[in-house]
Amino acid sequence: MRFQRKSRSERRSEYSDKTFVVFSECDLLSFLLKCLPNQSKRNVQRIIANHQVAVGGAPVSLFSFRLYPEDEVTLSWSPIRKRKRRDLPIVHEDEHLLVIDKPSGLLSVASDKERKATAYRMMSDYLMMKDRSARLFIVHRLDEDTSGILLFAKDRATQEALQKKWNDIVVKRGYYAIVEGAMEKKEDTYRDYLFEDKTNLMRVGHAFRGAKLAVTSYSVIASNPSYSLLDIDIKTGRKNQIRVQLGHRGHFVIGDDKYGEPSNPLKRLGLHAYELKLISPLDGRILDFKSPMPASFKGLFFKKGGQGR
């Protein structure tokens, strides 16, 4: 970046990796002119054109790029390179939606510690390579170590329609989970009140102000002396509810060192979001997106060529 009357070290210290939050709808150039009042319009345009601006972690070089409330705009000292989409299969894409099969170990969206290697960043880059003005909007999230179906919206109206009616339009959220031990029942439904403690971990407690009901149903697909493979359907979307409710009963999801100390035979969290079924708020169609069971999950329970989903 070029800043007047300041040394290189002073400029780097003041502006490198600065992030600004958007509070009202506007275009990128207008927003940055307000954020950088001491810079000329020409300098701000140069910063954008030089790929030193990112929105939600994805590099943007279009002056008229549309921003919306809660967007995060980051300024970088050096150009931000686009990231190629690798091992990130597209399950469905149309005018309004983009659905991917997210691998374990990849963040859905940027965090304080990681702003580059995210599903949102890679898919935003993918869309903007085809259309510089294209946008991607977050609808829901999967934990970093959970794999499976992740849905994004391609426009603000679709995002708002999905999120506003999410609990009413979602028909099924199916997961495969591998847990320690043998389940007491072949199928069951857990109903617990969850609350967040001072360490930001979710806990099972009693019904009180701030606690939210979590409903999780499961059926046993297969088992061996050490583990059980479960088909899970969550009726509510509480933070970490599968891991917390199962762990509370002594059946920790393998690889989950956040809520216990279970074994980790697959070197990943044993949780996979295999189905998201919903009623489109746009036209009433039933949308059913699925991802196959990871081969590593099958390997713990089924011999090669045996049964599995």
Image (spheres, rainbow, N blue to C red):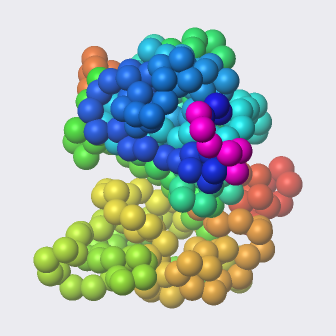
Kindly give the residue lying farthest to the right in the view shown: 304
How far from the left and from the top, in percent, is residue 207? 17, 80
Is residue 5 in the magenta section? Answer: yes
Examine the residues drawn in magenta and state their main secondary structure.
Answer: loop
Q: Pick whichever, 4 or 223, lies toward us.
A: 4
Is residue 194 in the magenta section? Answer: no
Horizontal arrangement in the rendering, residue 304 relative to residue 68 (left or right): right
Q: Is residue 190 above or below residue 172?
A: below
Q: Quadrant of the N terminus?
A: top right
Horizontal arrangement in the rendering, residue 169 relative to residue 4 (left or right): left
Part of the protein shown in magenta:
4-9
How far from the left and from the top, in percent, is residue 281? 26, 26
The image quadrant of residue 185 is bottom left
Residue 198 in view (yes/no): yes
Horizontal arrangement in the rendering, residue 26 relative to residue 126 (left or right): left
At 29% from the left and 27% from the top, the residue drawn is: 25
The image quadrant of residue 212 is bottom left
How far from the left and from the top, in percent, is residue 36? 44, 35
How far from the left and from the top, in percent, is residue 263? 71, 82
Q: How many marks?
A: 0
Q: Is residue 229 above or below residue 193?
A: above
At 34% from the left and 57% from the top, the residue drawn is: 237
At 76% from the left and 52% from the top, the residue drawn is: 295
At 71% from the left and 44% from the top, the residue drawn is: 8
Residue 228 in view (yes/no): no
Kindly give the residue lying farthest to the left in the view shown: 209
